[in-house]
Amino acid sequence: MSKKFAGQVSLLVLINLFVKLVWVLGIERNIQLSVGFNDYGAYYTLLSFSLILSIISDPGLSNYLIRHLSQNGISSNTNSELLFLKIVLSLIYLGSTCGLGIALGYKHDYFQLLLVLALYQVAWQFLTYLRGFLKGLHLFNAEIFFSVLDKVLLFLLFIPLLIYDLDLSRSIFFFAYSQLIAVVISIIGCSIFLRIKRVSVFRIGKIRLNFSLLKEVWPFTLFAFLVLIYNKIDVVMLEQILGKEMGKEEAGVYAAANRLLDASNMICVLFTSLFFPTISKLISNNKKIDKIVSSSFGILISFTIVIALSSWFYRRDLMVLLYGSESNKYVSGIFAVLMLNSPLLALYHIYSSVLIANNNLKQLNIISALCVGINILLNLFLIPQYRAFGATISSVITLALVTFLYSIFYYRHFKVKFNLKSNVKVILLVTTLFIANNLLEKTNIHWGFSMTIFMIIGFSTSYFSRLMNVKRLFSFINQNQNNQ
């Protein structure tokens, strides 16, 4: 990997991270406050529902395209087959989503919103597909631009609406339509750019429906689908079990409490996007991976434990800061428990990346299918009694089980010894943070300063115990790249 290439990839990831963090914590949060928790809850439910099924419209075709372009360059026959297949699958997705939506009782405004969000998923998948040409042909500057164009357009539209509190900002339909239009504009812009670069995306004379392409991607498609189910089905089940009115309200609460978890998880996604190519190369060259996995574990677990415990101890203050009068003890409690998922997500990203790179998709799918069943059963039992808090408990239990099974399989399959030293350091970090919280509670300083001190103590403990050893990780990566 050249320094230029690595720099472009890193810049792409960092810009996406920055824009998405601003979007999640800034625009989305303000939109929820403007439209109300109920309307946003309906939007969040239908978005989750449409996202689960969206795997139909792109079952790994974008990744297949990137790999094909990287290995073979431009091929008009393959490109046309892929795009035509994508169009057919998108129509199947729209039909399936609308049909299942009707079966679940989505009518009138609910169905209209579902249709808009389904069209948004199709448009987003097409944009991702077109961006695959940019990635596959290493046009990374253009990829950086088109990866954030839709969000930038929405920033320019919604910031004035939210600042001046205009009526349009209180319409969830306006928000949904705006997202769709912004992505369509990005698609048009990306298509024009590819045309200028003389990249052949589709030729009518080359149309042929080739379902055999799906054979190469179906194991990963199944894995992605199962992961979407156990991550998103809880929101859909809230509405189905509790009824539309209470379901909307609880989904809105869940969305608000989940927002900081989504934001913190983006750091893990950023890390994984750089970790995965390295680990894949090491495995393909039959080199040991235990040191890089251990270093990655230390960095991500340190960061996420500090974030999770900060959220737990300062839950009420954080929720009041974000949602003001809309916050209460119920929202704060859900938020605090949901944030326990942060360290679990870190472990999930590490171990799933290793197992995917090693092509252990059969084992991943078996584990994921088991956890989908457990998640649904837990939701059926907990949601009627505890509402959104029940879905939260179900989410934490499911993710804990997933990461436990992934880690067990990793240690057994790669014959890696259990790293007692790292786990002792994790216990030391957690113990230190609990002691720090007890001491800080006895002071009268503002909660913001208190939390800042708390986090500094946490990161300092991780650094000096060498649990968070960034220098070791990157020197190891550079050493392996130089030997290739």
Image (cartoon, rainbow, N blue to C red):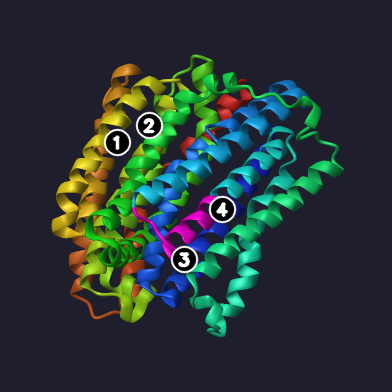
Q: Is residue 13 left or right of residue 249?
A: right
Q: Determine which residue is flagged by label 4.
A: 120
Mark 2 / mark 1, whichever is N-terminal: 2
Q: Earlier in the sequence, mark 3 or mark 4?
A: 3
- 2 or 4: mark nearer the eye: 4
SS class, disc 3: helix
Judged by depth in the image, the label closer to the viewer, 2 or 3, is 3
Marks 1/3: CA distance?
27 Å
Query: Magenta segment range?
Result: 105-118
Give the residue displayed 43% in from the left and 71% down from the top.
32
* Spot occupied by residue 479 in the image (x, y as percentages of width and height): 56, 27
| Residue 205 picture location, percent across and down | 80, 27
Which residue: 29% across, 50% down? Answer: 234
Q: Where does the N terminus fall, quadrant-wise?
A: top right
Residue 351 is marked as 2
Return the residue nearer the eye: 313 or 483.
Answer: 313
Seen in the picture, residue 328 relative to 108 is either above or below; the reply is below
Instruction: Residue type at mark 4: give it.
Output: Tyr
Say whether marks 3 and 4 touch (CB < 8 Å).
Answer: no
Question: Which residue type carries mark 2?
Answer: Tyr
The x, y position of residue 383, in whole percent, is 19, 54
At label 1, counting other C-alpha atoms closer than 10 Å, the crowd grade (few under 14, some 14-19, many 20 or more) is many
The first of marks 2 and 4 along the sequence is: 4
Residue labelled with disc 3: 25
Name the residue that disc number 1 marks.
403
Residue 389 appears in the rendering: yes
Q: Residue at x 57, y 63 (%)?
A: 177
